[in-house]
Image (cartoon, helix red, strand yellow):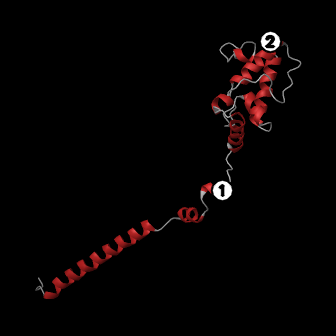
Amino acid sequence: MFPRSRQDGRVHIIALAVLGLFILGLAAWYVSWRRTPTAAQVSSASAPPVAAMPDTSSDAPIDQALGAARRATGATIDSTAYKNRWLDEVRGMDLGGLPGRQKELFLRYANAQHCTCGCGYTLAGCKASDMSCEISGGRLEALLDSVRTGRITSARGVRARPKSSG
């Protein structure tokens, strides 16, 4: 074949050097890319601290009410117990036309079932704390209708009225 020249060796060395520099450049780019903050990191870095922002969460009114109750009574209130407390009246619901047995059925279910709006209250408690809740309002209306028409006739296995409330 062809005689080997000295330049063939140089071409291989130059190609290896260029390849090595290319790999080093890729590595440097990758490291700088990993250190570059994302848009979310930049916006959170320039945003004021969370403590300085007003609390707009859905639990803010509940936390404020519990705080006021703690300050007024000096006692610690268990929010779970408060949300599951027994209510003898359901705000906004007219139970005047119900016989005593049906009223007791309605109250047992209203104080046992939890609202699905995410508040953590029973249906009666949710209606007491938030008259505008469409979920508890609709479910209470359906419950009242079911009790009135006789579709619900037993509260077996449903939470009973606590002894201290009666």
Direction front: furthest residue: 74
The residue mark sitting in front, 2 or 1, is: 1
Give 52 or 143, whichever is nearer the viewer.
52
Quarter residue 133 falls in: top right
Using the image, tell me which numbered label, if any, was put on residue 53. 1
Quarter residue 21 falls in: bottom left
**Would residue 161 be visible to someone looking at this image?**
no
Which label's residue is closer to the chain start, 2 or 1? Answer: 1
Residue 70 at x, y percent in the picture = 68, 36
**Would residue 102 be visible to someone looking at this image?**
yes
Give 120 or 150, whichever is nearer the viewer.
120
Kind of residue at badge 2: Arg
Using the image, tell me which numbered label, if any, was put on residue 101. 2
Residue 55 at x, y percent in the picture = 67, 50
How many other residues sit within 10 Å of disc 2, few (<14), some (14-19) or many (≥20)? Answer: few
- Identify the residue at image location x=85%, y=16%: 98
Residue 95 at x, y percent in the picture = 85, 21
Using the image, tell me which numbered label, if any, was put on residue 97. none
Query: Is residue 61 positioned above or below 166 on the image?
Result: below
Gap between marks 2 and 1, in whole Å?
Answer: 50 Å
- Asked whether disc 2 touches disc 1, contact meaning CB atoms under 8 Å apart, the reply is no
Q: Helix or strand or loop: what does disc 1 sit on?
A: loop
